[in-house]
Amino acid sequence: MPKDTFIQLPQDKQVRVLGAATQIFASAGFDRADVARIAQAAGVAKGSIYNYFETKDDLYLYVCQVGLKAFRDQVYGTMEPGGDIFLMVAHMFQAGARFAKENPDTVRLYLNLSSAGMDRFAEAIAPEMESFFADRFKALLGESARRGLIRPGIDVSMTAFLINNLFMTLVVAPVSRHHRIRLRAYWPEEEKAMDDDRGDDDRIRRAVGLIHNFLKP
Amino acid sequence: MPKDTFIQLPQDKQVRVLGAATQIFASAGFDRADVARIAQAAGVAKGSIYNYFETKDDLYLYVCQVGLKAFRDQVYGTMEPGGDIFLMVAHMFQAGARFAKENPDTVRLYLNLSSAGMDRFAEAIAPEMESFFADRFKALLGESARRGLIRPGIDVSMTAFLINNLFMTLVVAPVSRHHRIRLRAYWPEEEKAMDDDRGDDDRIRRAVGLIHNFLKP
Amino acid sequence: MPKDTFIQLPQDKQVRVLGAATQIFASAGFDRADVARIAQAAGVAKGSIYNYFETKDDLYLYVCQVGLKAFRDQVYGTMEPGGDIFLMVAHMFQAGARFAKENPDTVRLYLNLSSAGMDRFAEAIAPEMESFFADRFKALLGESARRGLIRPGIDVSMTAFLINNLFMTLVVAPVSRHHRIRLRAYWPEEEKAMDDDRGDDDRIRRAVGLIHNFLKP
Amino acid sequence: MPKDTFIQLPQDKQVRVLGAATQIFASAGFDRADVARIAQAAGVAKGSIYNYFETKDDLYLYVCQVGLKAFRDQVYGTMEPGGDIFLMVAHMFQAGARFAKENPDTVRLYLNLSSAGMDRFAEAIAPEMESFFADRFKALLGESARRGLIRPGIDVSMTAFLINNLFMTLVVAPVSRHHRIRLRAYWPEEEKAMDDDRGDDDRIRRAVGLIHNFLKP
DNA sequence: AATGAATGAGGTTTCATTCAT
DNA sequence: CATGAATGAAACCTCATTCAT
């Protein structure tokens, strides 16, 4: 959805623009994000942004798409129906945690999709995005069940959904202030270590263990 | 956080203001919500809103607090450390589903807390809100474990967290367009019945069953 | 088309706003006219203009309507089917000339309706405006013919049109630079007296005489 | 006023640029006309326009001059002091009508000269343009009067002016929406046939007849 | 000479908040 | 206390013009 102009830009300028937009959209939210500030942060003129994208909406959409594609590649990239589901789950949570640590702003863009007034973006981005994981993981679960690698009689859709929920709440959500507060409500002893990711890592490891126990035959 | 003026208002006017604000904040989001439109929808003058609340922020905060208190009362209200945890979980999911169906806008206000630019509201509202359930449910789990009513050796914090997550994703989240899209990715056959709550109810019932199986000794 | 807010304004503020808008629209044209400058000239805040009118378009439309109504009242006001057509024509040209001298900006607004990009305004204003004179004058001509007061066998529509054209080119048009240049092409000896209206008055008197000769039986 | 660059361009590119500019200036008006869109419509780069002309103003001026020269050649071209004034008038109205039908955009450019904010263009174009006809026609009238071919004692300037006015309002003006609305006010029965030129042609024929009657001795 | 990306001033419109009535 | 007009700071977007390639 960028104009050709943007596509033909030198890579580094593209990166600067997307980076600035990601950062500002993620911290201010779509409405409070100022295109002029994005331009300034990217080191280009305000008008140039509009040479690259039709509207602020378009810019937001594209920034999301690019960010979430990177996320998908890094996190779900290796998922194949014939793969080992236990390895897969472990990889997914670890890769997700790494991605979230390195690109918290991108992850925030995803979280914003659930907010009021963002429906148009959710509509444009979410269907493909969410189906990507759902379809693959359901296939993987089905194939694993058929081969007797996991507990028989499992509800494939529900299981895939629950695992993804765990992923969302443990890996994705913690980039937001609100979810960190939630976590603190359950593990108040970690209050001091807000910026310490060991708590996160530990929780993730335990969640992965829990899933393994739940899945194994 | 309203001014005294608001407190001393006739009940019905208070209700009108809070209702209008809830509806407009929930559908437009905080930034796009127009104080003038809220006033108009409430049938009061724009200036009156500022007789009742210091700022738009304050109004938002109070609307959230009132809404979420109602939510809490209705959903978690009966939770006591000595109660039956199985009944409690069942009640919580059912009451939550009913509340969400009857007050989707209030639930949306809660969801918005996770968005970019809403940190100040999360900060003000979430700690008490989240602890309310976390503390009580952890106590209930602890007491139940001590009395041998649930499977021994359970990780209390993690279990409470997971159950709350399930609640969030199955009961709370579906009020948002984005989450409905997510659900459709896992249960695409329900595509036609987007507005049909039978799917929701069924998922919730199964989730409650799942929790029971997980908890029972 | 103004909002109620404008209608309920003190007369003098209404006058100031309409006056400023007329002046600036007339001198700069719709596109180059800056709402901020209109506000400033009217001594109100920029935002206030938008309390009074939905859009710049609406403001323009209303300014035209008010101005042209005044024009109509002053120039065509006394026209009645049973009146004396010779007196009527004389009055019309004299009153028109006076109005144009006293309110050149209003007259310019009318001239602008013929320009590219102004179709939407022409569409909204012209039909009623033009029919007002056309209908009345055709009725007057018809009645006069029936009573034998004017030359028989006259083409009523064409005659009304031609008289109105004369009015337009001699009375209305001279407020524009372009038409003054046209006039100079036909009466170059008056070059010195660009701001002198004696030339205008003289032409108008002669035109009225010409019409009388043409009409009289 | 184009740069040499433009003059040395292949004919067809010149034609494309002038055609595109004419079309867009005429439909959008000077201010709303976008140089980029003109370039695109002409199939040249935006920057190239500025290789051809100093400014947008210059482009507009030149487009007008070229268009109006064509108009003049086609309509007034054959006018000579010794010619037959009756033939001349008939030719002028017919040729004008044909030109307006074939080049309405060019004619619109002329009409725009009377608008607010276009004075600088009127100043540059109109004096020569208007004098061209005025001088020649006055000479023709004078010569005809001297030779006794037309009614004696005629007011040459006023007559030339009135004939030109008729030409303007019947031949030139109908390219504008506003003037078509005016026409409809006088001949409402033609409402259905807005795009039908028979009404125009008929009116023009009658006007020519009227002029002949007026002029003939 | 041709191209089209870059620029930034400028313009319309919105809206939280104030304040006189 | 209610009202709603007034305010002006932003914010999105446009576009004439420049300039490096």
Image (cartoon, coloured by chain):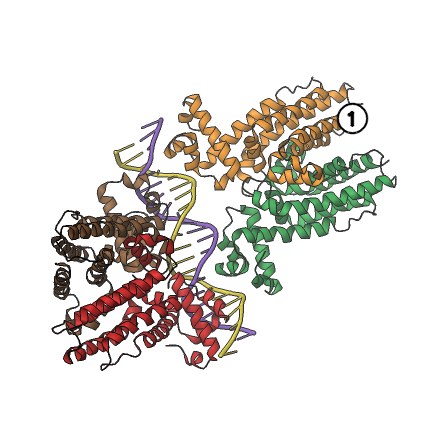
Chain colours: A green, B orange, C brown, D red, E yellow, F purple
* Residue extending farthest front: C153
User: For numbered disc 1, what is the local secondary structure?
Assistant: helix
Horizontal side, residue C215 vs residue D118: left or right? left
Looking at the picture, does residue C37 appear above or below residue D6?
Answer: above
Q: Residue A58, image x and y in percent?
A: 55, 53
Q: Which residue is mark 1?
A: B213
Q: Quadrant of residue D91?
A: bottom left
Measured as percent of width and height from the top left, residue B181 is found at: 65, 40
Coordinates of residue C77 in the picture (x, y in percent): 18, 48
* Residue D88, quarter of the rendered image: bottom left
In front: D94, or D65?
Answer: D94
Front one among D207 and B151: D207
Q: Residue at x 76, y 25 (%)?
A: B212
Can residue B21 be seen here? The reply is: yes
How many marks the image carries: the answer is: 1
Q: Amino acid at mark 1?
A: Asn
Quadrant for the C terminus of chain B in the image: top right
Identify the residue at image location x=41%, y=63%.
Answer: D33
- Answer with the quarter of the image where residue A177 lies: top right
Disc 1: host chain: B
Which residue: 34% across, 75% down?
Answer: D74
Q: Residue furthest right?
A: A148
